[in-house]
Image (tube, grey):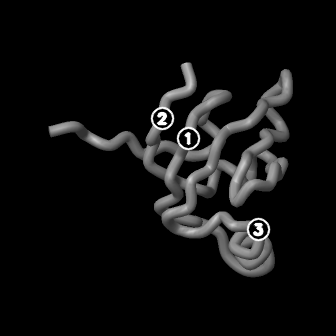
Amino acid sequence: MTRTKIIKLVDGEKGDIIKITALLLDGVMRRRLLDLGFVNGAFVEVAQKSPLGDPIAFRVSRTTIALRKEESGKIEGELIINGE
């Protein structure tokens, strides 16, 4: 039996694919991310990290979206593919 690894999007490495399991945000930011496709069950690819790690580009729903560490640290998911 394999054990799933739950990580925050901010901890993902380039090429990782993460299936969203929790969006730990409230209010306007939560609504904005839901509208952009960051919903439970969505697959998100870590597309690119800036040299200092902020912001991070993610691919979701065939769109590339940059999020700050503050935002991506509040989204959890199951690591599906390790991009290493």
- The answer to whether mark 1 and mark 2 are in CB contact below 8 A is yes
Report the residue at 62% width, 29% height from top.
13
Report the residue at 56% width, 53% height from top.
43
Q: For the residue marked with disc 3, what is the amino acid?
A: Leu
Q: Dot 2 lies on which element?
A: strand
Q: For the residue marked with disc 1, what is the amino acid?
A: Ile
What's the distance in space between the residues labelled 3 and 1, CA to CA? 17 Å
Per the image, the residue denoted by label 2 is 81
What's the distance in space between the residues labelled 3 and 2, CA to CA? 22 Å
Query: Is residue 52 found left or right of 79 in the rendered image?
Result: right
Q: Dot 1 lies on which element?
A: strand
Q: Dot 3 lies on which element?
A: helix
Q: Where is residue 62 in the image (x, y as percent from the top left)?
A: 74, 55
The image quarter containing residue 74 is bottom right
Q: Which disc number belongs to residue 36?
A: 3
Report the residue at 69% width, 67% height from top.
37
| Above or below: residue 62 compared with residue 84 | below
The N terminus lies in which quarter of the figure? top left
Q: Where is residue 75 in the image (x, y as percent from the top left)?
A: 60, 56
* CA neighbours of label 2 inside 10 A, class few (<14), some (14 to 19), many (20+): few
Per the image, the residue denoted by label 1 is 17
Q: For the residue marked with disc 2, what is the amino acid?
A: Ile
